[in-house]
Image: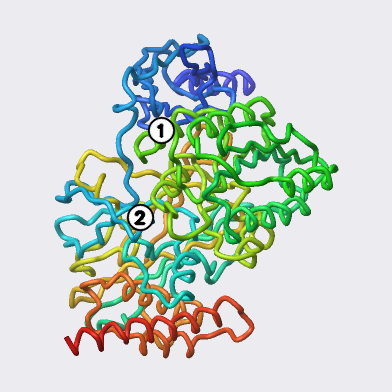
Amino acid sequence: MRQFIVTAFFLIHYYHLPAQYYIRGDVKDERNQALQNARIYQHSTHFLFYSGSSGGFGITSSNLFDSLTFTADGYESKAVRVKSDQYQQVVLRGLASNSTLQKPRLVSVTKNLPLEGRKKSFFGDESYSTLVENDFIKADKYPSTGFAVRIDKASYSNIRRFLNQKSPVPIDAVRIEEMLNYFNFNYKQPENDQAFIIESKLSSCPWNNSHQLLFLNIDAKKLSLDKIPPSNFVFLIDVSGSMDMPNRLPLLKAAFQLLVKNLREKDTVSIVIYGGSVGVWLPPTGGIEKQKIIKSIEELSPSGSTPGEAAIRSAYKLAESSFIKGGNNRIILATDGDFNVGQVNEKELEDLIVSERQSGVYLTCLGVGMGNYKDSKIEALAKKGNGNFAYLDDIREAEKVLVTELTQNLYTVANDVYISMKFNPVMVKEYKLIGYDNKKNISEDGTSELEGGEVGSGNGITAIFEINPNPSINNEVGILTLNYRLPDDTAQKKVVHLCNNNYKDFKELCNDLKFAGAVAEFGLLLRQSKYISAASWNDVDAIARGSLNSNDYLQNEFITLVEKAKKIYGKKKKKKDNE
């Protein structure tokens, strides 16, 4: 009798539970090529998923019938009514016009906020994307904002190059988020195999006594060496005539040789070159053959024009032909950015990269040179190629990027990473995101979307908001949501962090955060920000010296750069006063 009652109880409850179905399928283009990272929106749950490296996906559903919408950059979106117990084969059609290949993507965004104009910045023959500095935003009207999490560091070493040459820095060469990234401040390893750990700290603002700073630390897990997958590297090297200078091709040759010396047997290297013509210089070669790869690099010599478009297509084709499923498939493009044959403007290059990145191949860009250096083009390629961007001003920087921070720059732990921040208007009257400034050519478009970034192993990202506080006491400054996706995973994941009112005076902060404040203030001065009229180079110098880790070469070097900037900009001010 008791057994009958238990069985009846189980059956009653079982039949009242919602049935669970598993929607499986794949996403391809019209050429029957798998589309990786296609976005899949499930209407019944409002969740977003992504297709895997083979285009496949698997999504749970409580309904026999469900609705999915498929989107991918460069393709028409497609809404599908599906029966959950049937395998779905979804084909996306390519857009007819490259001019409509994708919506512009923003670095930071506050919904419905009026934005402005289109412009481009030049410094001699060098080109930079003109940036619109983030303004203060009223929290009661626009409490929610967001920004992409990226690990680019190119701006800092480029700034160093100008200051070492005793030259003022072009305003649009200064990207403060990349300056902060350069130092990996206050890094802590996430526990329990978590992908990220988040900390926040509220403090006074050293350049405005009535304001506060909210520091955000986002640290990515560090992969152990035995868990790093095999790599399929394609070195895409510019050997055109413009690279015939000591700080260009010779520097890159030395840099790549440093990387090769750290290859493992299971890694593979190919080389594509472009200069006059495009060709495969070295077919896929195992990491055990280091001397063969190094010899191949050493024999490179510069000549000819710069057919960048054809070279990029060739590199992607080679990377896909030697693709390692579950591995680290990455093109490393090294150039001064002076493409002069084929598609040469940023929009055309972006569209080309977006159409190619569906293959699951990442793109890291290394910039070199001066005089004709095209920062705007290289930066655009890295962002659209689901990768990162560094500038090599000397061999020491090459060693930092390709040896010391190899896993940070070349091994991904999360994709499509971005932060959503919702401020509490009771605590915050206005807020301003420092850095993460948008390009003018996309900030005018209110329909533009936020573009998440790729984050590598062991990266520590520091972001700073300047806050105009409300005169009230409350325990909650805001709520931070970190959105990301693991490599080869279809599901979007979230980490939610409550930013408490844990206020400390700036002088009482840990040295890392104080030094980060000095770097941010330095960047604002270099950008000649209208929001920092009370600050001075001496203030930056005092903060940096007061929080210096004397054993840290990079922090010591920063103080020398502040001294150089003080002399350069002090002369400019005296000249202006005399006039």
Would residue 505 be found to the left or right of residue 367 on screen?
left
Q: Where in the figure is residue 362, as x and y percent of width and height?
A: 56, 39
Viewer-side residue, 143 vs 556? 556
Image coordinates for residue 377, horizontal then vertical, percent: 41, 46
Q: Quadrant of residue 92?
A: top left
Give the residue type that dot 1 points to.
Gln
Q: Label 2: which residue? A: 128
Q: How is the image coloured?
A: rainbow
The structure residue drawn at horizontal position 21% and vertical position 42%, both measured from the top left corner, is 445
- Secondary structure of residue under mark 1: loop
Front residue of 213 and 235 = 235
**Left or right of 566 on screen, residue 469:** left
- Pointer 1 local density, CA inside 10 Å: few below 14, some 14–19, many at least 20: some
Q: Position of residue 542 (x, y in %)?
A: 42, 90
Residue at (41% x, 73% y) in the render: 201
Viewer-nearest of discs 2 and 1: 1
On the rendered structure, is 511 left or right of 420? right
Q: Which mark is residue 343?
A: 1
Q: Nearer the viewer, residue 251 or 548?
A: 251
Q: CA distance from mark 2 to mark 1?
A: 18 Å
Give me the residue at 39% from left, 52% from top.
419
Picture layout, residue 506 above or below residue 364: below
Q: Is residue 363 above or below residue 54?
A: below
**Earlier sequence position, callout 2 versus callout 1:** 2
Determine whether the residue tagged by mark 2 lies in a helix, strand or loop: strand
Would you say residue 469 is visible in this rendering? yes
Q: In front here: 258 or 384?
A: 258
Where residue 387 is drawn, which disc sits there?
A: none
